[in-house]
Image (cartoon, grey):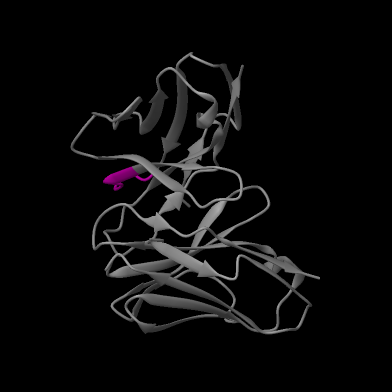
Amino acid sequence: GESVGLHLPTLSVQEGDNSIINCAYSNSASDYFIWYKQESGKGPQFIIDIRSNMDKRQGQRVTVLLNKTVKHLSLQIAATQPGDSAVYFCAENSGGGADGLTFGKGTHLIIQP
Amino acid sequence: DTAVSQTPKYLVTQMGNDKSIKCEQNLGHDTMYWYKQDSKKFLKIMFSYNNKELIINETVPNRFSPKSPDKAHLNLHINSLELGDSAVYFCASSPTVGEQYFGPGTRLTVT
């Protein structure tokens, strides 16, 4: 079946560096994508979203890039901080608002001091 | 104010028992969901409810039954618990179209 997946299970970066987390999706009908951050013992927390009619969206220290040609999504975190350590999930919603999200496997971002 | 709340946060029970997890959202959202997160952190949708109507029902065992007394609540009832049901269960809610807000999770351990 179609799914959303992440390339790297663990990503380790130095504090202050930029982080890039990648995600590949296979459902060409997907029209809405979200990045979530999950800290230990907590529920997923919304970071940023993007719709399929856009290829880039920026938030505070985060940027999401969408490449529909190769079905690729990325999350860029600028100047990573210790509080950015978490598991990051990409998710897609291809069936309209009432459907649940299809989540990728998650990338564990580790910030080195 | 907690947007999406779940109780209990931890639930330890024996095989064969029946248990319920409660979820409430105060965001006025139309749709609520239940997700299961396994030991490898994989999140998978189980159910969603829109205005008290089941919208999707993934291939979960019929031992799991969502119950929604009103738009702000979606409870999850599990019959005849099995070892493989051990996981973290997350409730979420969303407006008709948009991001989903997740609760803090309920860690279920079946012994």
Q: How many marks?
A: 0
A63 up-or-down from B25: above or below? above
Query: As rendered, which of B33 and A68 lies closer to the eye?
Result: B33
Horizontal side of A81 relative to A66 (left or right) equals right
Q: Nearer the viewer, residue A3 or B33?
A: B33
Residue shown at 40% from the left, 19% from the top = A78
When the figure is inspected, residue B88 is found, relative to residue A80, above or below; the finding is below
Q: Position of residue A72 (x, y in %)?
A: 38, 31
The quarter of the picture where the C terminus of chain B appears is bottom right
Does residue B109 show up magenta in the picture? no
Residue B72: where, in percent of width, then height? Answer: 35, 75
Is residue A28 among the parts visible in the rendering? Answer: no
Of residue A60 and residue B99, the one placed in the foreground of this image is A60
* Quarter of the N terminus of chain B within the rendering: bottom left
Q: Report the magenta residues as a range.
A: A27-33
Q: Is residue B61 above or below residue B44?
A: below
Predominant secondary structure, magenta span? loop
> x, y (%) of residue B27?
30, 64
Residue lying furthest right: B111
| Residue B3 picture location, percent across and down | 38, 61
Residue at horizontal 35%, vertical 33%?
A71
On the image, which quarter does residue B63 sit in?
bottom right
- Outermost residue, front direction? B1
Do we see residue B45 in this rendering? Answer: yes
Q: Residue at x 29, y 32 (%)?
A: A68
Name the residue at the left extreme: A53
Q: Quadrant of residue B52?
A: bottom left
Residue A67 vs residue B46: left or right? left
